[in-house]
Structures are given as C-alpha cells and as structure tokens.
Image (tube, grey):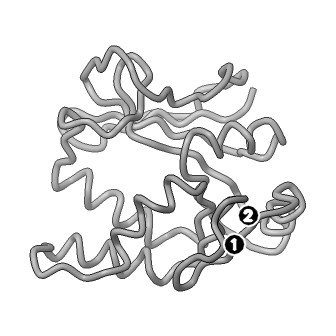
C-alpha cells in the first residue's frame, strides 16, 4: 500500500512561497534529488505541476545535481489534478474527475511513497483523510505573508521525528494524530 506524503520548504511563520531567502544549499538540493528518486510518483495540482514542468527541458546551465533531479522527475509517474487543463506532459496522467477514487486506487495498487505536491491539493487530500505524513522543511526565515503550508486549519498531528538536513534546515515529520 502506498503512503501519501506532503512536504515543502516552510518559513518559521508557516509560509511556503518561493522567496529568495529560501536558499537551497547543495546538501538540501541533493536531499531532494534522493527523495525524488525514491518516490513511486507524484500527485500535482495545476499550479505546482506548471512550476515543475521546468524540469522537462534540459538546460546547458544545470549542474550534475540538477540534471539528476530532472532525470528522476521525468522518470516517475505523475498525476495532475485539474479541471482546467486539457492535457499534460510526458509520463503524466490528467485527473479531472473523482480525485478521491483515483487517489484511493493509487494508494491500494502501489507500494512506496507518493508525493502530494502543493498546499491547496494537500488540503483536499487531508480533508479526504488520505495524507499519511507531513514533512515541513523549516528554514530560519520569517516571510510575514504568503501562502501557508496548511491551506486550511491544521489537522491534529503527532511529531514522528526531526532531522537536520543541512546547516540551517530541519525536517519535521508529522503523522495524523
């Protein structure tokens, strides 16, 4: 049975917006490369999928870790939840109806971790009671505004563990309480 995991970089005050102060060290980026390699797939909302499509096209400016990340991202299956998109890219399946049924089938048919990407999608999947783990990559910055990690009320959680990922970022792993 698959495990659905929602994780993102987060500021101390709970926001996940892309921001220059969210510096991604080589050690943190390498962590994300390995995480991507280990996934059985990813479920994206429309906006997050649009951002991640960056990895579909090679860039001569990429370093070896960026090429490794792109290779891992391209090779894994993706399910894109959207009612407005009419098509998706390579190795992706468009999910426009009955997200709950599709997610329950994925959970029952696959083994390993499936990433739930984006706070709005995670809110919907949380409401369905399907997220098994939340991973907050806590950066020592305060943004003061933006898109929160939890798009709605925070569900009851229990801390499972914490890990220092690089010299400034700690990963907090929670499970539903």
Question: Which quarter of the rendered picture does the C terminus lie within?
Answer: top right
Can you tell which of label 1 and label 2 is closer to the viewer? Answer: 1
Q: Residue at x 67, y 60 (%)?
A: 84
Q: Is residue 175 above or below residue 102?
A: above
Can you give x and y, in whole percent of width and height, for residue 59 in the image?
18, 79
Q: In this rendering, would 102 be left or right of 49?
A: right
**Cα–Cα span, label 1 and label 2:** 20 Å
Total numbered badges shown on the rendered structure: 2
Name the residue at 30% across, 43% down.
165
Residue 150 found in image quarter:
top right
Q: Nearer the viewer, residue 108 or 127?
A: 127
Give me the residue at 74% from left, 45% from top.
125
Q: Is residue 150 above or below residue 6?
A: above
Q: Earlier in the sequence, mark 1 or mark 2?
A: 2
Above or below: residue 18 compared with residue 50: above
- Name the quadrant of the N terminus: bottom right
Residue 53 percent coordinates (x, y): 41, 69
SS state under label 1: strand
Image disc number at residue 166: none
Tell me if mark 2 has few (under 14), some (14-19) or many (20+) residues whose alpha carbon lies within 10 angstroms of its own: some
Q: Residue at x 86, y 55 (%)?
A: 100
Q: Residue furthest left?
A: 61
Numbered mark located on residue 2 in the image: 2
Answer with left or right where residue 109 lies relative to residue 134. Answer: right
Q: Position of residue 62 (x, y in %)?
A: 15, 73
Check disc 2 and report its element: helix, strand or loop: strand
Residues at circles 1 and 2 in contact by the CB criterion of under 8 Å: no
- The residue pinned by badge 1 equals 94
């Amino acid at each position: 049975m698959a495990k659905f995991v929602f994780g993102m970089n987060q500021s101390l005050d709970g926001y996940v917006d892309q921001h220059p102060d969210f510096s991604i060290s080589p050690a943190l980026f390498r962590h994300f490369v390995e995480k991507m390699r280990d996934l059985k797939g990813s479920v994206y909302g429309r906006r997050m999928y649009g951002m991640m499509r960056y990895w579909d096209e090679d860039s001569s400016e990429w370093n070896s870790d960026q090429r490794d990340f792109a290779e891992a991202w391209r090779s894994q299956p993706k399910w894109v939840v959207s009612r407005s998109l009419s098509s998706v890219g390579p190795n992706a399946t468009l999910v426009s109806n009955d997200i709950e049924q599709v997610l329950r089938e994925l959970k029952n048919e696959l083994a390993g971790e499936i990433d739930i990407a984006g706070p709005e999608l995670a809110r919907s999947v949380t409401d369905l009671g399907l997220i098994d783990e939340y991973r907050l990559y806590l950066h020592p910055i305060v943004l003061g505004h933006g898109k929160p990690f939890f798009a709605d009320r925070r569900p009851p959680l229990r801390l499972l563990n914490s890990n220092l990922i690089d010299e400034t970022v700690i990963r907090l792993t929670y499970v539903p309480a």
